[in-house]
Amino acid sequence: MPVDLSVVEGDYFRDLLAQPDALRDTLEQLNESKELRTIAARLRKRKFETVVLTGMGSSFHGLNPLLLQLTSAGYPAILVETSELIYYRRSLLNAHSLIIAVSQSGRGAEMTRLLKENRGRASIIAVTNTPDSPLARRCNAVVLTRAGEEFSVSCKTYVCALLALKFLGDQLCGVPYDRTKRELHGVVRPVTHYLAHWKDYVQSMLPRLEGVRQLFLVGRGPSLAAVGTGALILKESTQFPSEGLSSAAFRHGPYEMVGPETFVMIFAGDAKTRELNERLQQDIRSNKGRAELVAQDAGECAYCLPKVSTGILPVMEILPVQMLTLALAVTKGSEPGKFRLASKITTTE
């Protein structure tokens, strides 16, 4: 018998369904700029000793695909949480560093302090949803998203930031703009199609969540964006304890927790490590744990991703996690995404 899903249909839910429009609006905003071309030329001439990718929360986790793109291109890129950068790795704030700073609001506590500590020494490329923010005003180049207002948990802003970071990575690595544009424009239709079936997906998830007390999200490579962000938004939206970590790290300790009350969402990822992730799913199930594989050819519809290019796959990977937030909210009988203690912009360190 179908379950009443009306409990989830609040402001956070409406933000989820508005993601295709936010992606479409952001695509219109993504254009080449003189400032970005200048920095990209300096990077290709090896004028920067280190590329520092930084952010907090989902903005931090969403940088994983860009990190891999830059390192694969031979650039010395590192990923550092902004809170760590401003207190423990301040030596990176120098004229030989390029900082790529991601912040939806552009005015969070850590990002504001970063601007103060940097004092114009390192060049900064900002990726933000707020054009009049301190970050956007005090950077050397800016890539703007147009996700619009967001109620609470990051969803529109996250997928739009992923799109902007893919655009930025291609710009820095010398990918022709027309090729990038064609690839990115392939994102709106599959996201729209997936979200159109949200009721079916949530209904199908509910039986597998009965009795679950431990929830993990695991993956490798670019999928670490969905792993980290997924665990974060599950806790934010439903207050359900969740942990995100690499598939390899899961083997080193948390695997001992596997049992009938454990649910593990495994992101298949690309061919390089897919077999390892599939084996992990088999091992979890053989030990009476619950495990679902998120892939473009997954057997279960809720975990089956639309066929898209590798570059925009991270956008798709967060969608089943969003469905999981709705399903968990149904099991609790409470509206997801309503903050009790937190706020949309974190202004206290």
Image (spheres, rainbow, N blue to C red):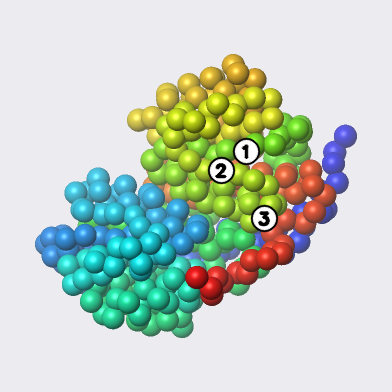
Q: Secondary structure at mark 1?
A: strand
User: Can see residue 97?
Assistant: yes
Question: Disc 3 vs disc 2: which is toward the camera?
Answer: 2
Distance of label 1 from label 2 (alpha carbons): 7 Å
Amino acid at pointer 1:
Leu
The answer to whether the residue labelled 1 contacts the one labelled 2, judged by CB atoms less than 8 Å apart, is: yes
Q: List the residue tagged with mark 3.
A: 237
**Which mark is first along the chain, 1 or 3?**
1
Residue count near mark 1 (Cα–Cα under 10 Å), binned few <14, some 14–19, many ≥20: many
Q: Residue sitting at 40 percent across and 34 percent down?
A: 270
Q: Which residue is mark 2?
A: 243
What secondary structure is marked by label 2? strand
Q: Nearer the viewer, residue 137 or 257?
A: 257
Residue 54, image quadrant: bottom left
**Numbered label attached to residue 215:** 1
Could you say where residue 184 lies in the image, as x and y percent from the top left? 42, 55
Position above or below: 343 against 239: below
Question: How dense is the environment of label 3, judged by Cα within 10 Å: few (below 14), some, or many (20 and up)?
Answer: many
In space, the residues marked 3 and 2 are separated at their CA atoms by: 14 Å
Residue occupying the point 33% across, 63% down: 88
Residue at horizontal 42%, vertical 32%?
A: 248
